[in-house]
Image (cartoon, helix red, strand yellow):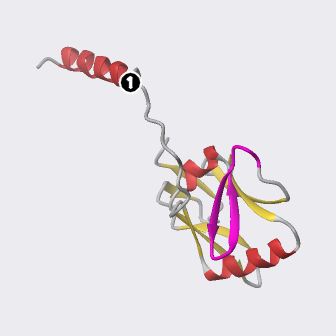
Amino acid sequence: MQPSIQRSLQTLSWKLFCQLPLPVRKCSTKHLLFLTESSIQRLKQIEAKGSLMRILVDSGGCSGFQYKFQLVDKIQETDKVVKQDGVVVVVDDVSLEFIKGSTIDYEDELIRSGFCVVNNPQVDKSCSCGVSFSTKLD
């Protein structure tokens, strides 16, 4: 088949595919994120003070995207709530696509203490600091 005809067929197939109605699915939060024992312990301390942790993915950093962790007191209507071992993590829909399947850890070291995202299956490349990354979704 000639390359121009093949490209036309691929374009037509893609346009037809994009016009199909999308199935409605309920979102299950099971296995969307995994929490290490150290992150669970730290989240219990945070929740005891009346706050929840929100994970965001924002543009920036040296690799294109960066992780942000915020303490919040409310869950928004559009948030996904991930529960594990009695603790809650809040993530918006867009950020969840960038961290789905990741592990959230809490590191307590001399140089810094804080939450971090490890083993993110969506990451293509990451910066040596571990905060910024580029994604396979680009």
Instruction: Decide which of 26, 50 is in the foreground and name it.
Output: 26
Q: Is residue 56 visible?
A: yes
Please say if 44 is above or below 126: below
Q: Residue furthest bottom?
A: 110
Please say if 54 is above or below 115: above
Q: Quadrant of residue 35?
A: bottom right
Residue 56, image x, y percentages: 70, 53
Q: Residue at x 53, y 55 (%)?
A: 28
Instruction: Decide which of 75, 33 is in the foreground and name it.
Output: 75
Is residue 75 rendered magenta in the image? Answer: no
Q: Residue at x 69, y 43 (%)?
A: 78
**Residue to which mark 1 is pinned:** 20
Q: Is residue 59 visible?
A: no
Say what amino acid the circle numbered 1 marks: Leu
Residue 14, image x, y percentages: 34, 23
Q: Residue furthest right?
A: 49
Tell me the crowding category of disc 1: few under 14, some 14 to 19, or many 20 or more residues within 10 angstroms, Cα based: few
Q: Residue furthest left?
A: 1
Residue 112, image x, y percentages: 77, 77
Classify residue 18 as left or right of residue 2: right
Residue 116, image x, y percentages: 66, 68
Q: Quadrant of residue 73?
A: bottom right
Instruction: Decide which of 91, 119 is in the foreground and name it.
Output: 91
Which SS does the magenta portion mostly show? strand
Q: Secondary structure under badge 1?
A: loop
What's the magenta region? 76-91
Classify residue 83 as left or right of residue 5: right
Instruction: Decide which of 106, 112 is in the foreground and name it.
Output: 106
Classify residue 137 as left or right of residue 98: left
